[in-house]
Image: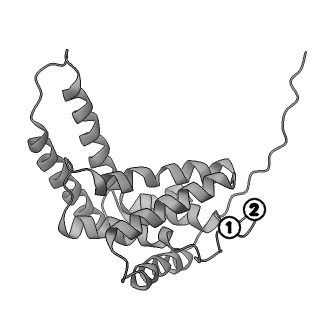
Amino acid sequence: MTNASTPTLKVEFELSETDLAFFRDRLETARADQADLDESRITAGVADMIAKALAANPPEFVKTRLRQLGPLVAMLDDADWNLEGEDRERVLNALAYFADPEDLIPDATPGIGYIDDAIMIELVSAGLAPELEAYSDFVAHREDLAKKDAAPKPPLEEVRTVMQDRMRRRRGRAKAGGLWSHSTVIRHYF
């Protein structure tokens, strides 16, 4: 007995530094356009975009990327993580693009309305890789602390400080062209 396979089409493309600069400029423009929105309206706009996108049943590669926005919103809402100042602004600035339904390709455009969002999510995830990794490690530590049979672990406040300091150091290395270099990470994804 053979299984009938569903035909698929794989599409790959490469974005040049000029292309990436265009998308980065759109991110900056989106935040400027959304400057009158407070944090709660940005996060609500992102949640609304995710819900609408998933309801539209986009391609799996879009769904996968949409799920990457969850931790960014969560780190803003997480009182234990207590992200503040410039760190918080970086995440909010990145999310502003997704709060606008009239982005590069309007989300309501059948079949392709969320492709630009998928590209932007890749850019945002790559640019905020130190934040995402630090937050993921923090959440894992918090879950370990909640286990009754867990070995003694450092308190949550101490781990938050360590993780956020590590996040800033890695971000600093990215600016200097180190391991978390934005263009290196973007080239990896595209």
Find residue 76 and report its horizontal and vertical position in percent: 29, 57
Q: Circle 2 sits on which residue? A: 111
Which residue was labeled with disc 1?
113
Tell whether label 1 touches label 2 (CB within 8 Å): yes
Asked which quadrant contains residue 137, the reply is top left
Residue 177 location in percent, x, y?
32, 66
| Image quarter (top left, top right, bottom left or bottom right) of the C terminus | bottom right
SS category of the residue bearing label 1 = loop
Tell me the residue at 18%/53% (across/down).
Answer: 164
Residue 162: x and y, percent? 13, 47
19 sits left or right of 95 in the view: right
x and y percentages locating residue 113 in the rendered image? 68, 67
Q: Is residue 126 visible?
A: yes
Seen at 27% across and 48% down, the residue is 134
Please name the residue shown 73% across and 56% down the image. 11
* Left or right of residue 81, residue 127 in this image: right
Q: Which mark is residue 131?
A: none
Q: Amino acid at mark 2?
A: Gly
Front in this rendered view, residue 117 or 8? 117
- Give the residue at x 26% y 65%: 88
Amino acid type at circle 1 is Gly
126 and 84: which one is in front?
Answer: 84
Check the picture and name the quadrant holding the N terminus: top right
Question: Is residue 131 placed above or below 108 in the rendered structure?
Answer: above
Secondary structure beneath dot 2 equals loop
Is residue 122 visible in the rendered image? The answer is: no
